[in-house]
Every structure is written in C-alpha cells, then in structure tokens.
Image: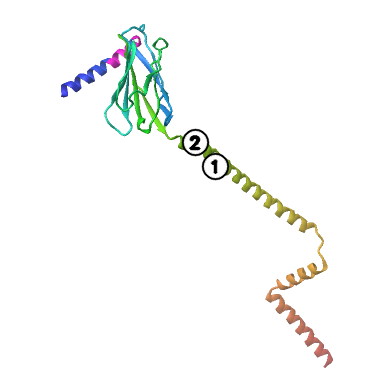
Amino acid sequence: MGSGADTSREAFGLLLLVCGFSRAFCIKIQVDSEVHGIVGQHVKLRCNFWSSSPISEHLTVDWTYKPHHGGPTQNILHYQSVAFPVAGGIFGNRITWEGDISSNDASIAIRDLTPNDNGTFTCTVKNPPDVQSNLLPTVLMVTEQATLLSIMVFAPSVLVVVLLLLRMQRKRRSSNKYSIEIINETNRHRKLTCMERISECCAKCAEDSDEEYDNFRKSVSNITIVKATSYS
C-alpha cells in the first residue's frame, strides 16, 4: 500500500518536472470556475485547451462529476474522435457534446437542470505526447427561477428605497436648519411692541439677585432715618 502511494508521488513529481522544464509537453486548460444555472434550463460548461503537439486521433477528453453533497467521482463523458456520454447515472441522456476539437474546444452542455446537478465538474485533456499540467474544477450551482427573479427584482427596489430615505432625511435636516436661521434672523431685526418691552423689563427685574434687593431696602431705610433726624 505504501509503495503504491510512493509510486504515485514519484509519477506526479516527474510530471511536474517535465512540465516545468519543457513547456512543449504541457497542455493548458481554461475553464469557468463557477457556473450558475436555473432549474429546467440548460447550461454550458466551457473547457478550452492549448497543446504544443498537433491534434491527432489519439487526443482524448474526459469529463468527471463529483456531487455537491458528497460521494464518489463519476465519469460522465469520454471523447476520442467521437463523444461518448455515459449512459445512466444522475444525468442520464441530458449531457451533450458542445466542443470543437479543431478550435481547441472541449465543452459540454447539460439540459433540464435540477438541484441535484449541483457539484464539481472537471475537464481532462490528453494529446500524446503532451500531458495536462493543471486540473481546474468548475462548480455548478443550480437554483430555482423564482429565487433568482426575486433577487433581481427586489434587490434594486430595496436599494432605491434606502437611497430615497437617506435623501429625504438629509433634506429634512437642511430645511430645519434653514428655518431656524430665518426665525432667528427675523427676530433679531424686528422692532419690539410695547407689551414685549414691558415683558422684557419684568424679566430683567425678576433676574435681579437677592443682594441687590437688600441694598435697595437699606438705601430706603437710610433715607427715612435722615428725614426723621431733620424733622427733630
């Protein structure tokens, strides 16, 4: 068991060395890291490749699928001159070949999507003597159409309402500040009426301290004593 694992590591290391020192023996793959689909519709899983060797009848393409909820990896399509979708399984006959090898395209499509199709798809291309240097997964996420429509419709509406509320609050603050400034400016330049002057004088009198009242009472007492002495 241990020797098999060591052999696999050595083979993988040798593959990295070959791709590292001689790019002529490497196949580069480009896929979409994430694809969104809607239940009942179809979706395309893109896979483009670049090989230094001329394309021949020995070129092969393999697509695999790993369920989102876990489970073993499944082979879903094999290509060599002709596409051979794997019959049965979770996809049945819903997988079709959408590629064009002459254009370096190894894409597939899945129709009649279901939520059970969620998972990770991997495209592998071999064109001897070139070997593939990178395995890039594509994550498929299938959702209900109502969910997507609700997000697309209500999200902008909520954003618009929030912006309007913020704008109204800002205008209200600006209007209140302006109104206060107008009232203060008007009161500052307006002439007081007779009653308002009397009220203002009464208010000033009410603000006099107890000490001032005592001084006023003492002054009145002194004036009374002086008058009494002069009369005697």
Which residue is denoted by mark 2 in the rendering? 149
Please tell me how crowded label 1 is: few (under 14), some (14-19), or many (20+) other residues with Cα within 10 Å.
Answer: few
Quarter holding residue 33: top left
The amino acid pointed to by label 2 is: Leu
- Res 158 label: 1
Q: Foreground: 208 or 70?
A: 70
Task: Identify the residue at horizontal 34%, vertical 10% (top origin).
Answer: 81
Query: What is the span of residues highlighted in magenta in the rendered image?
Result: 15-24
Alpha carbon distance from label 2 to label 1: 14 Å
Q: Of label 2 and label 1, which has the lower sequence position?
A: 2
Work out which quarter of the rendered image holds the C terminus and state it: bottom right
Quarter holding residue 205: bottom right
Report if residue 21 lies within the magenta region: yes
Work out which quarter of the rendered image holds the N terminus and state it: top left
**Secondary structure of the residue carrying numbered label 2:** helix
Magenta segment's dominant SS is helix
